[in-house]
Amino acid sequence: MYDGRPILPLTVSGLSYEAGGKRLLDTVSFDLAAGRRTIVMGPNGAGKTLLLRLCHGLIEPTSGRVEWRGGSAVGRHAMLFQRPVMLRRSALGNLHHALALNGLPRTEREPRARQALAHFGLEDIASQPARRLSGGEQQRLALARAWAQRPQALFLDEPTSALDPAATRAIEAMVQTCHAEGMKIVMTTHDMGQARRLADEVIFLHHGRLLEHTPAEEFFDHPRTPEAQAFIRGELLW
Amino acid sequence: MRILHSALISAAIGLTLALSGTPVSAQDKVITVASTTSTEQSGLFKALLPKFKEKTGIEVRVIAQGTGQALETGRRGDADVVFVHDAASEKKFVAEGFGVERFEVMYNDFIVVGPKSDPAGIAGSKDIDAALKKIAAAKTPFASRGDDSGTHKAEQRLWKAAGIEVKGAGDWYRETGSGMGPTLNTASAMNAYALTDRGTWLNFKNRGDLTIIVEGDLKLFNQYGVILVNPAKHSHVKKELGQSFIDWLVSGEGQKAIADYKIDGEPLFFPNAKKGQS
Amino acid sequence: MNQQNAFITALDLIASLDPVLGDIVLLSLKVTLSAVLIAAAIGLPLGAALALGRFPGRSALIVVSNALMGLPPVVAGLVVYLLLSRSGPLGFLGMLFTPGAMILAQTVLILPIVISLTRQIVEDLWAEYEEQLRSLGSSRMRAIPTLLWDGRFSLITAILAGFGRASAEVGAVLIVGGNIAGYTRTMTTAIALETSKGDLALALGLGIILLTITLLLNTGAFVAGRMAQRAAG
């Protein structure tokens, strides 16, 4: 269902980011292949969000590279924020706007937007003012909005941390749908249960450094580094 | 997109509104006359212009300024005709080539108004020289236009004739730097004396304690002249329309209309046109 | 004169449907609303561009437009007067002493207000929206219409501020309009004229009418804005 040439794998090499004289991300390198759900974990301040923003191209690294297969991948990967920003217009209008930004021809926007809402069972809220929706509905709408752009990879930055269990379940189901359809999932989370439910592989960050990049079972059952072992045991790390 | 759209639409509406009120076509029978606050505020134009328009179909737009400013408006070419009252500057205006010819139209008279208590003791006097000397001697407040208008210039000539130097005379001599009406408002508030034209005074409502103190001296007569702005300097001047306004003012009909304008039975202006002075 | 007179005069004027007064009110509205529309059409995109643009001299422009919010109307009037005078660069237009000149002067007067307030509003919105919009594929310039539309309820206030300044000022329209009876006489120049004629009751009466109109317009804008906001979230 995705248009155009494949952009994966994503190769991140020697990625560093400094701000205010502090090195927040320190020579991080990894490859991300298509298909597998990658969960980025680590204690607060480990650099998870920063890593996603760098990969998504929202900020420029101090050094190092983010390389997609075949060069530019603009418009082919999307991101879901912890708190989505909805425009002051209807839910459907928000999808229209995103599709316009994505360069979709005018006549194709309406069917695509309707399709995205229907795909996730959001038809009912189509005409409602997006900013009046509940937090859960807004996040689901944001995911539908991202999906409508038909990205090959989707970054999710703690998308459920502000949501109740029902909304969290709904988002997780949507993420599974996207994954099943072939979308690459890269997601940060604090929620160990969620990580276990969703992860195919885990990237573990600590103090801006990548300590582990391993398949999920291996990470959860036999973490190699003492930091990861402590993290999984639920100990406080800093 | 929608914003751009509405922005364009509002711009279009705005421009349409703007242009609809801006007849720029030369065929319009409209002339602009720069005149003085005294003529406008006396109500004279309200009486004259409808008669003129009925006869000729020409609409006269009057901008009321001080004489100095009105002549400057003519000099810049922003009026077709100037109708003011300061013979010396009018003659200079013509001599410099900005005006075609000066026609005398009418005169009115100045009066000195002041508080009923009359602190300078000059009420009822017909001698302006003596009255001004007493005001200066008593250092009672005097409100001056101070705006380079015809009235202001006339006032300065009167002080000079009385042998009094008002520049730096002290804080009893107060320049308002504004039109006749505002100056009268100031005089009324400060209980000061002031020189005013009779027309503005008769139309002035906020008199407070002020009343006429000095009137009737021949030196207080005030001649009005009308001049066509020179098309040789400003080619857009509406020569024919402007001249027909001047012609009408000095004609028997125009002169009668001026004489007929009265407030409370009192005439304000006295027609005295004679052909051909410059 | 006493205040009661002024209210009676105002009521009299309204009750008698005085056609001269009607013309003056219409002209005032036409001039001010035209100026507001033109200033909005120019100032909204320009203010947003100033908020989002990154170019040398941007800070200087922001300071200048903020400072020009305090431009004395007389100065704006004088500048437009010198421009439009037959002896000025735009003299060939023959626009001096016409309603068009008054619209131009008021536009000059309120444009800095619309630009400055728009810049502030859009800048604040951008701080909130930036990453999301860029993630969705928006460039800074492409974000201008998006942010203007999303900030529409705040921007109405900016435009009303411009309207308030334009409808209240007398200095600029007096200089470039000439206060010609039946042609360029507005509410404010008429008030100035009646004041100078010492007819304070009539002047205050006109003032009351002007204030009433301004109040009605603002109420209308407020109510419409509230209703739209409730609908749009």
Image (cartoon, rainbow, N blue to C red):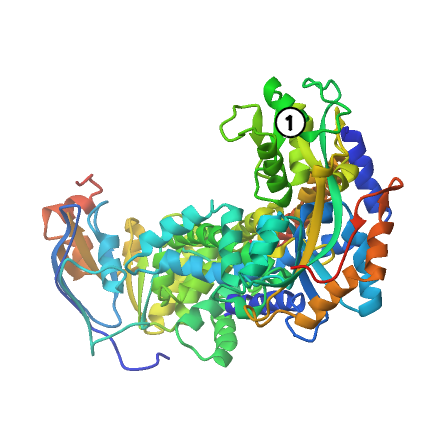
Image-based side of C119 in relation to C186, left or right: left
Residue extending furthest toward the right: B265
Nearest the viewer among A80 and A121 is A80
- How many numbered marks are there? 1
Mark 1, secondary structure of its residue: helix
Q: Is residue A65 left or right of residue B247?
A: left
Chain letter of disc 1? Answer: B
Splitting the image into 4 quarters, where does residue A231 fall? top left
Percent across and percent down for residue A145 are 43, 66
**Residue at 61%, 18% in the rendered image:** B138
Q: Indicate the position of residue A97 as horizontal and vertical percent values.
A: 46, 68
In front of the other: B76 or C74: B76
Residue C77, compared with residue A200, is above or below; it is above
Q: Few, some or many C-alpha atoms within 10 Å of disc 1 (few <14, some 14-19, many ≥20)?
A: many
Disc 1: which residue: B132
At a point 26% along the width and 79% down the height, the residue shown is: A6
Using the image as rendered, state which of residue A168 and residue C50 is in the foreground. Answer: C50
- Tell me where residue B78 appears, x and y as whole percent: 59, 62
> Does residue C82 appear left or right of residue A13 in this picture?
right
Mark 1: amino acid: Leu
